[in-house]
């Protein structure tokens, strides 16, 4: 591999890493909207549902149930409707990856 090829490869890898970091940052912004009720990084105060470390599938299913009116809520049905199903999956993965 010559020097130009190496530089191009590094640029592509750097761009890929930058895009991946941007995606992580975007998911953190979405998840930050949950902090008022569910605590920073999903570590809730007593009386609220903690999300940190819960199974991704459980968080995702609860959000989808709120979104589609299958689970009663005061606010969550409005909040969940603001996200696509893919965004909900990404938010659920974020909280599942946090330490309780």
Image (cartoon, grey):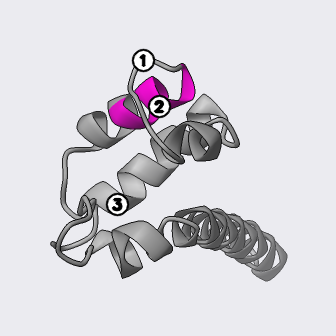
- 34 relative to 47 in the view: left or right: right
Pinpoint residue 11: horizontal percent, then vertical percent. Answer: 77, 75
Q: Circle 2 is placed at which residue position?
A: 66
> In the image, what residue occupies the spot 38% across and 25% down?
71
Q: Earlier in the sequence, mark 2 or mark 3?
A: 2
Q: Quadrant of residue 2?
A: bottom right
Label 2: element kind = helix
Pinpoint residue 48: horizontal percent, then vertical percent. Answer: 26, 64
Q: Circle 3 is placed at which residue position?
A: 95
- 8 relative to 66 in the view: left or right: right
Q: Quadrant of residue 16?
A: bottom right
Q: Which residues are magenta?
A: 62-68
Please rate how many residues cluster around mark 2, counting C-alpha atoms within 10 Å: few if below 14, some from 14 to 19, many from 20: many
In the displayed structure, 68 sits above or below 100; it is: above
Q: In the image shown, does 37 or 52 lie closer to the viewer? A: 37
Pinpoint residue 8: horizontal percent, then vertical percent. Answer: 81, 71
Q: CA distance from mark 2 to mark 3?
A: 17 Å
Q: Circle 1 is placed at which residue position?
A: 70
Q: Quadrant of residue 72?
A: top left
């Amino acid at each position: 591999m010559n020097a130009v090829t190496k530089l191009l490869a590094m640029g592509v890898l750097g761009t890929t890493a930058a895009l991946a970091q941007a995606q992580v940052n975007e998911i953190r912004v979405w998840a930050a909207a949950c902090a008022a009720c569910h605590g920073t990084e999903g570590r809730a105060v007593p009386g609220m549902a903690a999300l940190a470390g819960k199974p991704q599938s459980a968080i995702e299913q609860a959000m989808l149930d709120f979104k589609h009116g299958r689970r009663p809520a005061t606010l969550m049905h409005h909040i969940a409707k603001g996200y696509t199903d893919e965004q909900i999956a990404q938010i659920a993965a974020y909280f599942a990856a946090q330490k309780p």
